[in-house]
Image (cartoon, grey):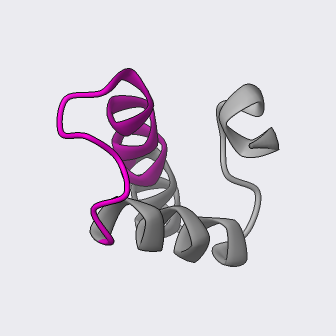
């Protein structure tokens, strides 16, 4: 996924796409990708809360 290579989310659409992946259980718990996705989601949520 381009978002994972980029390391950040640019829009709410990307946020909800990755949120669905994380919540849907498609990634093994503790997997590197899962940790990266969780970090990206948290960073986007923090950014939104500041605005």
Q: How many marks?
A: 0
Residue 16, above or below 2: below
Q: Position of residue 20 (x, y in %)?
A: 44, 74
Region in magenta? 24-42
Image quadrant of residue 22?
Answer: bottom left
- Asked if residue 44 lies left or right of residue 31, the reply is right
Residue closest to the eye, 40 or 48: 40
Residue 6, above or below 45: above
Determine if the magenta segment contains residue 1.
no
Residue closest to the eye, 32 or 51: 32
- Asked if residue 30 lies left or right of residue 20, the reply is left
Image quadrant of residue 19?
Answer: bottom left
Which residue is found at the position 25% from the left and 40% from the top? 28
Residue closest to the eye, 33 or 28: 28
Residue at the limit of the structure toward the left, as seen here: 29
Residue closest to the eye, 33 or 49: 33
Task: Give the quarter of the figure containing the C terminus.
Answer: bottom right
Which residue is found at the position 48% from the left and 43% from the top? 40
Determine if the magenta segment contains residue 37.
yes
Which residue is found at the position 70% from the left and 77% from the top? 13
- Asked if residue 11 lies left or right of residue 27, the reply is right
- Asked if residue 22 lies left or right of residue 7, the reply is left
Which residue is found at the position 37% from the left and 22% from the top? 32
Image quadrant of residue 37?
Answer: top left
Q: Position of residue 1 (x, y in %)?
A: 74, 43
């Amino acid at each position: 996924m381009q978002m994972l290579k980029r390391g950040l989310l640019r829009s709410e659409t990307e946020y909800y796409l990755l949120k669905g992946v994380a919540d849907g259980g498609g990634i093994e718990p503790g997997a590197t990708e899962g940790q990266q996705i969780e970090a990206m989601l948290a960073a986007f949520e923090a950014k939104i809360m500041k605005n």
